């Protein structure tokens, strides 16, 4: 495959390519690739006349891992050393970082350190032949999702407020069509100087965001006040919030109870009756409800799953333990009974291990366990406004689920086929049917095969429509 050296193209073509790539927020190489691809596909943009430059944010090329990318401008303040920690904090949050160091910043930290921490080339010079042959400052301004300036010096903010562009950092900031976050850092007298106050006010009016500065000790001996740069963790969190704004939380303020997993019904101290439930579906529902903002209580039978983060998990063994925990968790707004509760237990649990005897197998008399779903559905007081049961069937799925629906008194039933061929028990996918009441009718909504997480998300969004703040 032939290679193309862009620097060897004639000036007119180079100028066209530079402007076209800047307009589209791409590097010249990427622009050439797009042109060639369009040419191959028969879509060719006419070369005559360069269209006006658009100021609308062009979609930036995705980073290699699809992670958000920040252009981090490090200004020449004593807090520049903290910017190195900031690179690490951003990378911990799976954010790619490309650093630009001002001339003054290089008096405090080296490009080598920033490069080693960011695993990227560091940019320092506006008139750098290597990066500017394709208007590198425009690319640095646009090939990112956010520009962070830390520390933002008084000088750099003054230049921004005035629209200067006489070095790489200020040129990037002037050419930017991405959001900008400043972390100012300076001596309290500089921060309180009317000139800085005016500049900060102007920048805020220009839609520039700030984090800090904080109050505290200054690097200068004996000085304290407002001017310390926000901590790297604070700046990283503020950047993350701008990059990934919190999603809508339709279940915020709602309390949701979920049961999951099997129950173990002891025969004696070492043996028990169990079933093959893995708990994955219930845990996924609890996690999805938590992500939707609900306060979640998860009552789980014996499963080998870690506690989902942010959720209070109550581990239980038997159906009776589970019922006690469920009753103790009331009142709730929604109760989802996804656990595969054993229908029976032995009438009298042996206090010692049952022994093999010549008399043959000991008779195991079974008695019915409490029916948690029916008990909660039929409560007079504290009945949750929305009670959802699960019907795991191995045959006549809808028919059996409808019969269960009629018996239990719950509001919805999620029916799934758990016959061995489906691999649902213990597996990662599920095919479910949602039964609900519409007047006297029972409606059946059949969902396609999905992962258990997808089933959970779909169920939670149905719940949110029914009882959530989005309803
Ligand atoms: C030791 C030392 C520490 C400095 N610390 C700060 C500071 O914390 N904040 C600030 O705004 N300027 C500080 N300055 C002044 C800036 O380095 C100076 O204004 C420089 O022009 C800023 O350039 P830049 O904004 O392009 O990085 C400091 C200067 C020196 C010599």
Image (spheres, rainbow, N blue to C red):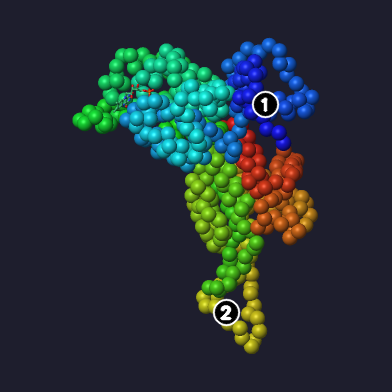
Q: Is residue 160 above or below residue 460?
A: above
Dot 1 crowding, Cα within 10 Å, few <14, some 14–19, many 20+: some
Report if residue 334 is visible in the image. no
Q: Is residue 371 above or below residue 61?
A: below
Residue that mark 2 sits on? 354
Residue nearest the observer in this picture, 455 or 133: 133
Question: At 46% across and 16% down in the image, what residue appears?
Answer: 165
Residue that mark 1 sits on? 32
Numbered disc 2: secondary structure: loop
Q: Is residue 142 above or below residue 195?
A: below
Disc 1 to disc 2, C-alpha distance: 79 Å
Which of the four quarters of the rendered structure image does ligand 1 lie in?
Answer: top left
Question: At 64% across and 15% down in the image, what residue appears?
Answer: 12
Question: At 60% across and 26% down in the image, what residue appears?
Answer: 27
* Quadrant of the rendering where the C terminus is positioned: top right
Q: Is residue 367 left or right of residue 43?
A: left
Mark closer to the chain start, 1 or 2: 1
Of the two numbered discs 1 and 2 in the rendering, the one whose residue sits closer to the viewer: 1
* Residue 210: image location, x then y, percent: 41, 25
Residue nearest the observer in this picture, 433 or 139: 139
Which residue is at the far left?
222
Q: Is residue 139 left or right of residue 444?
A: left
The number of numbered badges drawn on the structure is 2
């Amino acid at each position: 495959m032939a290679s193309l050296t862009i620097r060897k193209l004639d000036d007119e073509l180079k100028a066209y390519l530079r402007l076209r790539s800047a307009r589209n927020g791409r590097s010249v190489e990427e622009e050439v690739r797009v042109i060639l691809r369009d040419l191959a596909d028969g879509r060719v943009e006419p070369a005559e006349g360069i269209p006006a430059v658009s100021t609308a944010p062009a979609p930036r090329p995705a980073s290699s891992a699809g992670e958000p990318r920040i252009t981090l401008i490090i200004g020449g303040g004593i807090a520049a050393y903290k910017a190195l920690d900031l690179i690490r904090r951003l990378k911990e949050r799976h954010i790619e970082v490309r650093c630009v160091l001002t001339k003054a910043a290089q008096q405090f930290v080296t490009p080598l350190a920033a490069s080693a921490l960011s695993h990227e080339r560091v940019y320092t010079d506006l008139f750098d032949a290597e990066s500017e042959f394709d208007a590198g400052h425009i690319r640095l301004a646009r090939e990112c999702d956010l520009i962070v300036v830390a520390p933002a010096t008084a000088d750099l903010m003054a230049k921004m407020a005035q629209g200067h562009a006489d070095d790489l950092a200020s040129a990037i900031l002037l050419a930017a069509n991405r959001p900008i976050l400043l972390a100012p850092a300076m001596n309290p007298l500089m921060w309180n100087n009317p000139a800085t106050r005016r500049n900060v006010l102007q920048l805020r009016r220009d839609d520039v965001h700030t984090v800090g500065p904080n109050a505290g000790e200054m690097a200068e001996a004996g000085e304290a006040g407002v001017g310390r740069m926000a901590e790297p963790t604070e700046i990283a969190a503020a950047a993350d919030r701008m990059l990934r704004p919190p999603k809508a939380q339709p279940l915020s303020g709602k309390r949701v109870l979920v049961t999951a997993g099997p129950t173990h019904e002891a025969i004696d101290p070492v043996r028990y009756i169990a079933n093959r439930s893995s708990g994955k579906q219930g845990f996924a529902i609890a996690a999805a409800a938590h992500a939707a903002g609900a306060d979640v209580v998860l009552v789980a039978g014996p499963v080998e799953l870690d506690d989902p983060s942010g959720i209070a998990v109550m581990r239980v063994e038997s159906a009776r333990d589970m019922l006690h925990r469920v009753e103790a968790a009331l009142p709730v707004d929604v109760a989802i009974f996804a656990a595969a509760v054993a229908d029976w237990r032995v009438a009298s649990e042996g206090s010692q291990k049952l022994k093999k005897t010549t008399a043959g197998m000991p008779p195991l008399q079974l008695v019915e366990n409490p029916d948690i779903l029916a008990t909660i559905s039929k409560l007079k007081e504290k009945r949750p406004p929305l009670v959802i049961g699960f019907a795991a069937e191995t045959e006549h799925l809808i028919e059996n689920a409808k019969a269960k629906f009629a018996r239990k008194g719950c509001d919805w039933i999620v029916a799934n086929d758990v016959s061995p061929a489906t691999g649902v028990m213990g597996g990662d996918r599920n095919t479910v049917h949602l039964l609900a009441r519409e007047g006297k009718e029972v409606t059946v909504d059949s969902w396609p095969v999905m992962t258990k997480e997808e089933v959970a998300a779909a169920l939670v969004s149905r719940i949110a429509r029914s009882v959530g703040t989005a309803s």
